[in-house]
Image (cartoon, grey):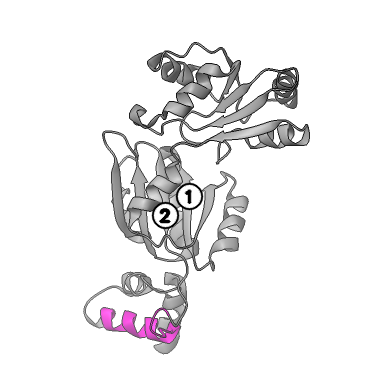
Amino acid sequence: MAGRLYVVGTPIGNLSDMSERAVKALEQADFIAAEDTRVSAGLLAHFGIKTPMVSYHKFSTEQREREIVDRILAGENCAVITDAGMPCISDPGEQLVKLCRDCGVEVESVPGPSALITALSISGMDTARFSFEGFLSVTKKQRERHLNEIKDMPHTLIFYEAPHKLKNTLNDLLETLGDRPAALCRELTKLHEEVIRSTLSQLKEYYEDKTPRGEYVIIVQGRRGAAERNETTLADAALTAAKLVEQGEKPSDACRKAAVGTPYKKSEIYKEYLKAHGETEKD
């Protein structure tokens, strides 16, 4: 008789978030497929769990997946875990679950903490509808294609990002999506948990001279329609920018500020501003 695959959620930071059911599932499994056995060794030691582990991560071969499934088909129970949070959500496990399903193996979820839901719940952003976009590709063309595909979505957008890529990602989000309200969440459930609710331009400026630390969840407001913006048009946004220029702002800065809360990018407002003033050169 075949065994079962348990998809087990683990803490994203605070070990007190580990559920009794998760501890029991890991204790009773015949073996654990872990993203990083060194990281998971600390978790298991903390709860006195002595179940043996095998390494299973995004670079694992099809042969390793097959080995795991063969063991389950032979009657062993396996628990799959990631370094933090729920497996299969921008983490290893998705392909293993698919393979088990294809082979008729029962898959059971032992739910636990999730960084994206944790961040969204305390971000102050719209939670009625949202789209989880995971990690953006490190390849420039793929990143551009990804962002262009979602830039007109009306619902909240959620991204994961590593500290060494945060600055580039904030810049790309601002460039493609325009200056929108956003929330930046880091080190969730840990000692230095931080949530900054601002705009993409202000977040980019905040990190210009600051070194990002910890793992990040970026939450960005979806594109707002004209009706939701009280029928604000591109011409209206350009007029707002013009008024700011009259008050002493540089045109580029004025257009950036005028873009906040609208679906228009700074570049779009800037072109409209130049057109309205019969100008062709940038300031």
Marks 2,1: beta carbons within 8 A: yes
How far is mark 2 from mark 1, CA to CA?
A: 6 Å
Q: Dot 1 surroundings within 10 Å: few (below 14), some, or many (20 or more)?
A: some
On the image, the x and y values in percent for residue 267 come to 45, 71
Tag 1 or tag 2, which sits nearer the N-term?
Answer: 1
**Residue density around tag 2, few if under 14, some if 14–19, many if 20 or more, within 10 Å:** many
Q: Residue at x 48, y 17 (%)?
A: 38
Magenta segment main secondary structure: helix
Magenta stretch contains residue 233: yes
Residue where numbered disc 2 is placed: 219
The quadrant where residue 80 appears = top right
Q: Identify whether 122 is placed above or below 21.
A: below
Q: Which amino acid type corresponds to the residue marked 2 in the rendered image?
A: Ile
Q: Is residue 250 magenta?
A: no
Would you identify the image quadrant in which residue 258 lies?
bottom left
Residue 254 image position (x, y, % from top left): 31, 74
Say which residue appears at 53% left-offset and 65% top-offset.
Answer: 151
Query: What is the three-letter code of the residue carrying label 1?
Result: Phe
Query: Which residues are drawn in magenta?
Result: 228-245
Image quarter hosting the C terminus: bottom left
